[in-house]
Amino acid sequence: MSKQEKFYDLLDTLRAGVETAGTLALGTLGLACEGAEKIAEGVKLRYQAARVEGEMDGKLMEAGEMVYATHTGNPTESEALVEKLREIDDLKARLAELNETLGRKPEGPFCPGCGEAVEEGDRFCRSCGEKLD
Ligand SMILES: [Zn+2]
């Protein structure tokens, strides 16, 4: 191999390297864009989840007040309470859906012994060994 050939060989190697690097950079850029989109989507979903959670908290408080009003001798129509509870159920379902989309674990089930989250289908708590139903 002449000096010139060696030089061209070296240039080829360099070019191949640049091309590979270019492809990698573009690939990373593509991934970055996809990631940003996912993050934006995640932020939107988290915002929605927080709003549903807030709404649910409000309704739970209202339901609590209804129950408490019954205790203080100022009973709420049971239908109104059932309606309120149904609204809470709906919100809870929506929240679970949002959380699932977000890849978060939906709430519960929890160990009755230690309060740690347990897996669906576990017979015993992995933290404290409590028997689960
Ligand atoms: Zn436990």
Image: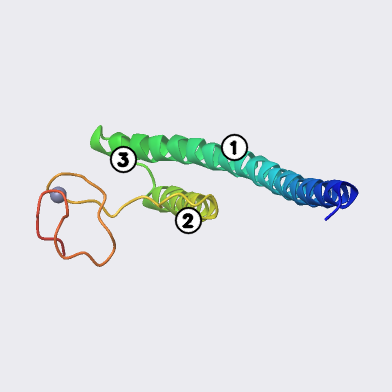
Give whichever of discs 1 and 3 has the lower sequence position: 1
- Percent position (x, y) of residue 85? 41, 50
Give whichever of discs 2 and 1 has the lower sequence position: 1
Q: Are marks 1 and 3 in contact (CB under 8 Å)?
A: no
Q: Residues within 10 Å of mark 3 (few under 14, many from 20)?
A: some
Q: How is the image coloured?
A: rainbow
- Asked whether 128 or 93 is in front, the reply is 128
Alpha carbon of mark 3 to alpha carbon of mark 2: how far? 22 Å
Foreground mark, 3 or 2?
2
Foreground mark, 1 or 3?
1
23 lies left or right of 99: right
- Percent position (x, y) of residue 2? 86, 52
Q: Residues within 10 Å of mark 2 (few under 14, many from 20)?
A: few
- Percent position (x, y) of residue 36? 69, 41
Q: Quadrant of the N terminus?
A: bottom right
Disc assigned to residue 82: none
Q: Amino acid at mark 1?
A: Tyr
Alpha carbon of mark 2 to alpha carbon of mark 1: how far? 16 Å
Q: Amino acid at mark 2?
A: Ala
Q: Residue furthest top?
A: 72
**Which residue is rendered at x = 48% and y = 56% of the image?**
93
Q: Which residue is mark 1?
A: 47
- Asked whether 31 or 127 is in front, the reply is 31
Q: Residues within 10 Å of mark 1 (few under 14, many from 20)?
A: few
- Percent position (x, y) of residue 54? 50, 35
Q: Which residue is mark 2?
A: 93
Q: Amino acid at mark 3?
A: Val
**Which residue is rendered at x = 56% and y = 40% of the image?**
46
Q: Residue furthest front?
A: 2
78 lies left or right of 46: left
Q: Which residue is mark 3?
A: 67
